Image: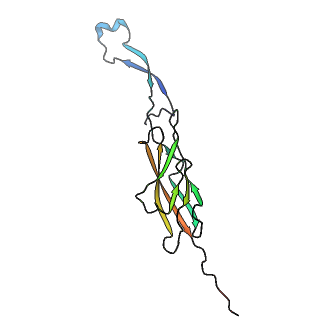
Amino acid sequence: KPLDFETKKAYTFKVEASNLHLDHRFHSAGPFKDTATVKISVLDVDEPPVFSKPLYTMEVYEDTPVGTIIGAVTAQDLDVGSSAVRYFIDWKSDGDSYFTIDGNEGTIATNELLDRESTAQYNFSIIASKVSNPLLTSKVNILINVLDVNEFPPEISV
């Protein structure tokens, strides 16, 4: 089991050592065993932020105005003396121009008009990094389903 400073900072236990191969010349000296107390102090290691979910799924209607917030992601720095977290869209994915993310709040908003008939689903990643150490990052997948809107309601001619 790995050690985790944030869970438990120290472990203390007793160890007993004994010599099972007794030498009859020293038998009168008593049993050859001893105990010692061992204390292990766990050192803190700077770890990346942790997202609150392994996957985020969101829905948005195709006629949603540009700039509308459709959801949010959250990640926390679980280290002692926690750092603020910044959010970024992983620009290597297909959702990079259709959505934006507020780097401080983690809110995701539309950046372009959506058309369900051309793309019904967007799948991309969000990266969270620690402000105090931007090299420590985590990534989570985002799945956005575009919901259909009846763009051509039936007309009745009289």
Residue drawn 42% across and 60% down?
A: 93
Classify residue 20 as left or right of residue 138.
Answer: left
Q: Residue at x 47, y 37 (%)?
A: 132
Residue name at image x 45 percent, y 42 percent: 48
- State which quarter of the image contains the N terminus: top left
- Along the line of sight, which residue is nearer the eye, 81 or 51? 81
> Which quarter of the figure is the C terminus placed in?
bottom right
Q: Residue at x 53, y 62 (%)?
A: 111
43 relative to 75 in the view: left or right: left
| Image position of 153 with respect to 143: above or below | below
The residue at the far right in this view is 158
Q: Is residue 36 above or below residue 46?
A: above
The image position of residue 136, as x and y in percent, is: 43, 42
Of 39 and 110, nearer the camera is 110
Q: Residue furthest top?
A: 28
Q: Judge by depth and name the residue closer to the eye, 98 or 73.
A: 98
The percent coordinates of residue 106 (x first, y second) are 55, 51
Q: Is residue 156 left or right of residue 9?
A: right
Q: Residue furthest bottom?
A: 158
Query: Where is residue 19 drawn, in percent x and y?
Result: 34, 17
Displayed quadrant of residue 151: bottom right
